Image (spheres, grey):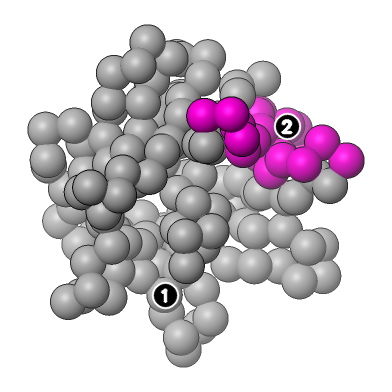
Amino acid sequence: MKQIRLISLWTILVMACSQMNAQQLTQKYNSFYNRTEFYNSSGTMVGYAKYNSFYNRLEYYDASGNLLKTEKHNSFYDRKDINDGNGNSQGYEKKNSFYKRTERYDENGNMKYTKKWNSFYERYDIYDANGNQVGYYKWNSFYERWEFHKQ
């Protein structure tokens, strides 16, 4: 369950990194608050994610506690539906078993980016819709956290 949470949280890192022009973002699980926290390169918390068992969804908040987006599994289409804080659709994410990657689509069905496991470097490589690598997502075993590195 913890690995599923960590893998699904990579999208907020990509969005936050592009908004802040940071070179690196990290995420770490906080067992006291039972949530995953996101930090910028200077160590300031920029947001967190927490699972809401009542609504059966993952909720993302900024550092002030404002709801940014939600992710919920859609069993009918076998995908993860993504909504903004007001409940408006922001797209969906689904696994492509043929290419062995996860693909993210916007609300109109256009592909935004893909994530694929790179076993040689032991990381998730992130590609834009044109196939250009925009960064990667790697586990830092020393600090026990995931780190996003922008290309």
| Residue at image coords 26%, 54% | 34
The quadrant of the picture occupied by the C terminus is: top right
Name which quarter of the figure residue 132 lies in. top right
- What separation in Å lies between label 1 and label 2 (alpha carbons)? 27 Å
- State the residue in front, 96 or 136: 136
Q: Earlier in the sequence, mark 1 or mark 2?
A: 1
Query: Is residue 42 inside the magenta stretch?
Result: no
Residue 135 % position (x, y): 65, 29
- Residue 125 is one of the magenta-drawn residues: yes
Residue 133: assigned label? 2
The residue carrying pointer 2 sits among few (fewer than 14), some (14 to 19) or many (20 or more) residues within 10 Å by Cα, namely some
Count of numbered circles on the image: 2
Q: Which residues are magenta?
A: 120-143
Is 95 left or right of 72, judged from the image as shown?
right
Question: Callout 1 environment at 10 Å: few (<14), some (14 to 19), or many (20+)?
Answer: some
Image disc number at residue 73: 1
Point out residue 53 in the picture as x, y percentages from the top left corner.
23, 74
In this view, 135 is above or below 90: above
Front residue of 26/112: it is: 26
